[in-house]
Image: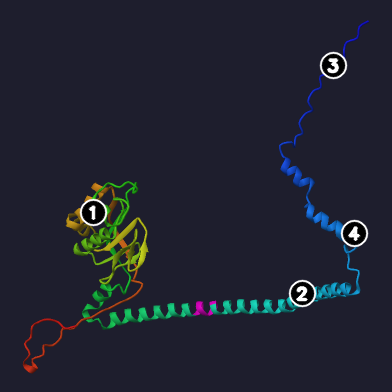
Amino acid sequence: MSQQPPDRSTASPSARPDASMSLLTNVMDHSLDDGYAEATARRKADGSAGMPRTLKAKLALAAGLVLAALVVTLGAAEARVSAPVLAKEREELIDRIDAETSAADSLESQVDKLRGDVSERQRKALEKHGGDQGELVALLSGATAVRGPGVKLVIDDAKDTDQGGGGPRETSGFADTGRVRDRDLQRVVNGLWQSGAEAIAINGQRLTALSAIRAAGDAILVDNRPLVPPYTVLAVGDGKRLSTAFQDSADGQYLQALKDTFSIRTSISVQEQVRLPAAPSLIVRTAEPKAADTGSGAADTGKGTS
């Protein structure tokens, strides 16, 4: 019976998974450099490896260990001693801050109280020494709160104030044309004064003859106090007559043009009674005519001096 010849073909062994990482494998297998390994072998052969064998070397090692332990001990002791001192200084600093804060709050309360006392005395002085014009002066200066018939005028930005229309209103620093601006409120207030208003307030801020309406960025300031829309303008006066006179005036027509052109929202209504607070700060300025100087032959030019 014939036998099959043996199969001499041999399959190639499968490649190792880490065959492509020869450098990493070499680093892992030979973690210690050959030079270091040889130096260690020589030291073992010479008997110099391990702990020092001579008395001098042992004493030096012991002295080093004692010095290191001393340094660590002194550092720990110093930290333990200074910790209560630092904690005490921190507590003292916190106490000083609290005390100074309380003192500042107390002084601020005293300032507010004295400011209110001064304003009240000024108002009483105006009412007492104003003579026949005392009530009028107190009214114009905002010294007293007022109430009576009048009008309520509400002005608000357009619903969509993000769209610019390319109009001339965009050139004054605002991002769109639908925003109410300081000059708009200036014209409205001046129009109400001209139409017969006796007292005016915007968002509870009483206006006087010395009030200023200005802009700071996109904000509107009345006497340096920022206001937010909608702007509610209350005016004391003959309600129907005041409303009609204002809407027929140039400033009323200007406000209507803002509504028609830029969609600024406005509404005006006659009120049976409105209440206006007193001005937060009272400033009264008076002027007297200067007598003409007829001496020294100087010609009177009629011009004032500064």
The amino acid on which the numbered mark 2 sits, given as a three-letter code, is Ala
Q: Nearer the viewer, residue 181 or 34?
A: 34
Q: CA distance from mark 4 to mark 3?
A: 55 Å
Under mark 1, the amino acid is: Leu
**Residue at label 3?**
7
Residue 206 placement (x, y as % from top left): 32, 67
Q: At numbered mark 2, what does the secondary structure look like: helix, strand or loop?
A: helix
Range of the magenta residues? 101-106
Question: Which residue is the extreme one toward the right?
Answer: 1
- Residue most toward the bottom? 296
Percent across and percent down for residue 118 are 37, 81
Q: Earlier in the sequence, mark 1 or mark 4?
A: 4
Does dot 4 land on a helix, a strand or a loop? helix
Q: Is residue 265 above or below residue 272?
A: above
Counting residues from the N terminus, which is met first, the one under dot 3 or under dot 2? 3
Amino acid marked by disc 4 = Ala
Of badges 1 and 4, the one in the foreground is 4
In this rendering, the label closer to the viewer, 4 or 3: 4
Q: Position of residue 236 (x, y in %)?
A: 27, 64
Q: Earlier in the sequence, mark 3 or mark 1?
A: 3
Earlier in the chain: of badge 4 and badge 3, it is: 3
Q: Nearer the viewer, mark 3 or mark 1?
A: 3
Q: Nearer the viewer, mark 3 or mark 2?
A: 3
Which residue is label 4 attached to?
45
Q: Which residue is mark 1?
A: 255
Mark 3 and mark 2: Cα distance apart in space? 80 Å
Tags 1 and 4 in contact by the CB under 8 Å rule? no
* Residue of label 2: 76
Residue lying at 80% horizontally and 73% vertically, measured from the top left: 68
